């Protein structure tokens, strides 16, 4: 639903007295990311109100593209808190509008609250209720942003959808490849593994080759953007104070069931108020006393049990994948030089892929991995290139 628009007047004014552009190869990396985009073509920029997407919009304007800014309203009035620093907060929509006004580009606010609820929030609650550990940012990217918003961009006649994600896109002949960002501390490839080949062909990520976030803020200062010093959001936008179980209690109260906390041998150590408050690999906040450190090894929804054990009990060498998306052909996934990330914050580890006679995919680790949690993503790489991945279904 369209509810706000500003009409373009002119590009960013030339000759302004703002700070100079970075002196390294940052601008060259931006130009490389846009090399296969027709000069002067219309593009839609997804503007969250943060510094990254604002700078992405600014560089597209400065390079002469016809830029249309789009911001998504992801909550209705009763859908959840609108907190500063969340990508869908009211203040962030105002910031996006202010940036669009500075850049003199059209800016639309689209009401995606119901889509977001059905595609992201409800599945998030369902997964936690089932004893899984979901990744809502992946769900948001693959549905609301790279499906619904991407279709909207095409309907507007845009040649590309541009975002502020930290990912490198490059064309290899007729194919498009995705690589980890130049700044490994900002890389978002893990959260974008579900990007399809068709979507990758249409998307552009102008910030992926920048050396650091400080360069992005320098660019924001250069362009005179009001968000240049705005802090990054840290929490999941719809989860206040990181309390996942509050969301489950609200949306799936029928699934909240107290149960036992047990050792791997079945010894009962204590009680819990619902498995949605736990995740595989968790150590703190278990609410039990024990002479040795204990970790959540698995969650048994059927028995309402939180199973705990020593650190070594977390070790896994094989696990299944489901709902996979691959950006390369299967033959390219059979090499012995692949690595996999099983958590966004963990380093990639050596692994290989196998398929059984029923075409079920299995990940086989070179060495045992810890904290392999159903619901999380397993994302494969060959060097810096992201090959795709799937969701962890069963470990062991």
Image (cartoon, rainbow, N blue to C red):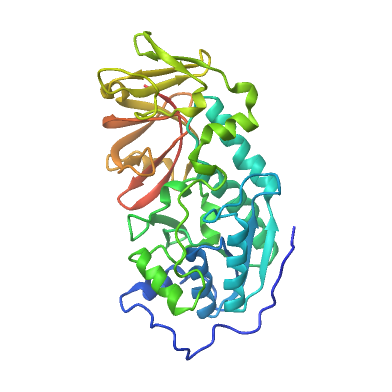
Q: Position of residue 28 (x, y in %)?
A: 37, 75
Q: Which of the pair 156/246 is nearer the observer?
A: 246
Q: Is residue 120 above or below residue 367?
A: below
Q: Can residue 324 be seen in this view?
A: no
* Residue at x-position 67% and y-position 44%: 79
* Residue at x-position 70% and y-position 44%: 78
Q: Where is residue 86 in the image (x, y as percent from the top left)?
A: 54, 53
Q: In the drawing, does residue 15 fall left or right of residue 247?
A: left
Q: In this view, does 294 lie above or below 134?
A: above
Q: Where is residue 65 in the image (x, y as percent from the top left)?
A: 56, 77
Residue 19, by quadrant, is bottom left
- The image quadrant where one finds the N terminus is bottom right
Q: Is residue 343 visible?
A: yes
Q: Which of the pair 246/316 is nearer the observer?
A: 246
- The image quadrant where one finds the C terminus is top left
Q: Which of the pair 281/176 is nearer the observer?
A: 281
């Amino acid at each position: 639903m369209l509810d706000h628009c500003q009409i373009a007047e002119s590009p960013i004014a030339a000759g302004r007295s703002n700070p100079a552009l970075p002196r390294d190869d940052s601008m060259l990396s931006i130009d490389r990311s846009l090399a296969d985009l027709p000069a002067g073509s219309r593009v839609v920029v997804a503007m969250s109100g943060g510094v990254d997407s604002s700078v992405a919009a600014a560089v597209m304007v400065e390079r002469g593209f016809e830029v249309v800014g789009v911001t998504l309203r992801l909550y209705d009035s009763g859908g959840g808190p609108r907190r500063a620093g969340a990508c869908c907060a009211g203040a962030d929509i105002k910031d996006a509008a202010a940036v669009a006004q500075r850049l003199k580009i059209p800016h639309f606010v689209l009401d995606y609250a119901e889509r977001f609820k059905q595609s992201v929030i409800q599945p998030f609650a369902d997964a936690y209720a089932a004893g899984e550990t979901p990744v809502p940012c992946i769900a948001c990217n693959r549905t609301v942003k790279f499906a619904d918003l991407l279709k909207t961009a095409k309907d507007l006649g845009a040649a590309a959808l541009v975002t502020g994600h930290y990912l490198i896109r490059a064309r290899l002949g007729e194919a498009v490849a995705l690589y980890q960002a130049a700044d490994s501390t900002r890389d978002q490839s893990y959260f974008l593994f579900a990007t399809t080949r068709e979507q990758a062909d249409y998307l552009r990520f102008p910030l992926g080759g920048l050396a650091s976030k400080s360069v992005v803020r320098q660019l924001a200062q250069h362009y005179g953007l009001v968000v240049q010093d705005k802090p990054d959001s840290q929490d999941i936008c719809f989860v206040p104070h990181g309390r996942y179980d509050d969301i489950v209690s609200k949306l799936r109260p029928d699934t909240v069931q107290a149960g036992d906390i047990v050792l791997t041998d079945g010894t009962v150590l204590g009680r819990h108020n619902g498995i949605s408050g736990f995740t595989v690999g968790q150590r703190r906040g278990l609410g039990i006393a024990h002479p040795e450190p204990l970790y959540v090894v698995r969650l048994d929804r059927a028995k309402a049990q939180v199973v705990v054990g020593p650190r070594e009990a977390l070790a896994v060498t094989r696990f299944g994948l489901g709902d996979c998306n691959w950006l390369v052909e299967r033959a390219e996934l059979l090499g012995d030089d692949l690595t996999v990330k099983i958590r966004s914050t963990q380093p990639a580890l050596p692994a290989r892929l196998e398929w059984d006679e029923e075409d079920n995919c299995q990940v086989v680790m070179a060495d045992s991995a810890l904290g392999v949690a159903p619901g999380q993503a397993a994302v494969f790489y060959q060097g810096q290139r992201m090959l795709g991945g799937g969701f962890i279904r069963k470990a062991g």
